[in-house]
Image (cartoon, grey):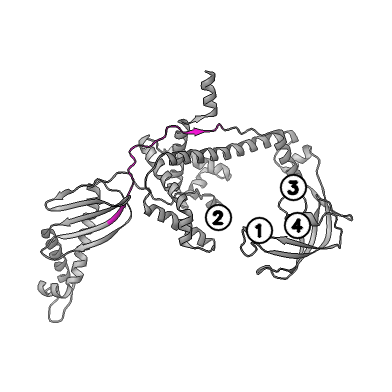
Amino acid sequence: MAELVDALDLGSSPFPGWGFESPLSHYLLLEDDLLVEVIDKEGLKRELNIKIPAEEVDKAYQKVYADMGKKVKLDGFRPGKVPKDVIRKRFHREATAEVIDSLINKHYSEAICEKNLEPVGTPVLTNVDIDEGKPLQLSFGIEVMPKLDEIKIDGLKAEEIKAEVTDSEIDEVVEITRKQQATLRTVDRPANETDMLICDLEPIDGAIEGLGDTPMNNQEIDLDSPKTVKEFKEALPGAKRDDVKDVVLSFPEDHVDKKFAGKSVTFKTTVKEVKVRILPELNDDFAKRLGLEETFLEFKINLRKRMEAERKTELLRIQKRDIIDQIVEKNEFDVPEAMLESYFKNIIKDMKQQNQEVDEKEIREKYRPIGINSAKWYLLYHRLAVLEKIEVSAEDTENWIKRFAESYRMEFDKAKEILTQTGKAAEIKDGILEDKVIEFLLSKTDTDQKSKETKEG
């Protein structure tokens, strides 16, 4: 179950599904004497000023005082009989806070709607001027969505996808699989470059914090593996059982583990066994051993299909990434800071969950360009979906779930239940929408094959 939940990490966007209406910069009378003003500031920032008439402010005060009179208990007065003048004198500050809250709740959303504003993030109340008998003046600092009436998609280019796999590539994978199926036999001879060694390793100088000085016994060192560090691959060919060699490992400055970066350590390496690989013959028995096919020919045919499918998937990913980069570059507009902040918070949260050291200022600087492009693409593909009437149907979602179920060899209903329980429905729908927009954009691109057909025609 945990693996399936992890598999549902769809790379979901950190941005909520905001709309795209553009702001207007003028005054608007919502009702008698109620004045709303929007002032353009830098970029997508706006100042929203709301003036609420004195009569409405007074009514709000009277209502709050009346409600308080029913609840407050003061010495010398019966419950519900406290005079308004006493309540006003004792609870004016509390009453003012309630009046402001009630009038903001009523008129902020009304002003936003009537002005066609699409705020991003939380509005900041920057000024309040209130008193009984006077109009209430409110000022908010807000950010709005960029205006995206038209999106440039002309001139997009994409390379034709060619997912063919060569015979030599097939042979290379077959040989890797053959080595994985090999058996190991201990031999009494010097090691060669294709052998497996069993060694005891003991750090004897240049010890690194966290590595300690405890020997690491019975370590497998595969001299034929590209993953084995080069110092072992250079020092151990020719070694026999009971030979002892000092091997110096030097770690690069950019090593993923900082405590090793740029440092060296010497290992006293004692060879305990030299093992040779006994490779299986490439025949039908080899295919049957893998449990996938009956014959070796079937194995190679199906291997080619799988490799071509994997290559096509990877090339499609690269092609889609290239299309996204092109359309983001073609359409210049400001991105709301609130969207970027949401993006940064998600990155910081993920890093903390992985117990990584977090310098939030550095992260905001490092990931800002990536965040801007991510936010721009999010806004672009959602707006394109509206402009081109691209929608996600129930059938689209069901087909996605079917593919998911097939990938994990489960029943459709079980897959649907898991997806529902994990709350991934909205992310799945958004991912499908993104894919459909990319498919639309690819249909508008010039590929090498299209150009060739045009010339030949």
Q: State the separation of the CA atoms marked 3 and 4.
A: 23 Å
The first of marks 4 and 2 along the sequence is: 2
Q: Is residue 406 rendered to the left or right of residue 48?
A: right
| Predominant SS of the magenta segment | loop
Q: Is residue 298 above or below residue 195?
A: above
The first of marks 3 and 2 along the sequence is: 2
Q: Is residue 361 rendered to the left or right of residue 210?
A: left
Which one is in front in this view, the residue at disc 3 or the one at disc 2?
3
Q: Which residue is mark 4?
A: 231
Q: Is residue 265 above or below residue 328?
A: below
Can residue 423 be seen by looking at this rendering? no
The image's mark for residue 252 is 1
Residue type of the residue flagged with mark 3: Gln
The secondary structure type at the circle numbered 2 is helix
The first of marks 3 and 1 along the sequence is: 3
Q: Is residue 89 rendered to the left or right of residue 295?
A: left
Residue type of the residue flagged with mark 1: Pro
Q: State the separation of the CA atoms marked 1 and 4.
A: 13 Å
Residue type of the residue flagged with mark 2: Ala
Q: Which residues are magenta?
A: 141-160
Q: Position of residue 320 (x, y in %)?
A: 51, 39
Specify few, some or many for label 4: CA neighbours under 10 Å numbering under 14, 14-19, or 20 or more: few
Q: Position of residue 381 (x, y in %)?
A: 41, 41
The first of marks 1 and 4 along the sequence is: 4
The secondary structure type at the circle numbered 3 is helix
Q: Which residue is mark 2?
A: 2
The first of marks 3 and 4 along the sequence is: 3
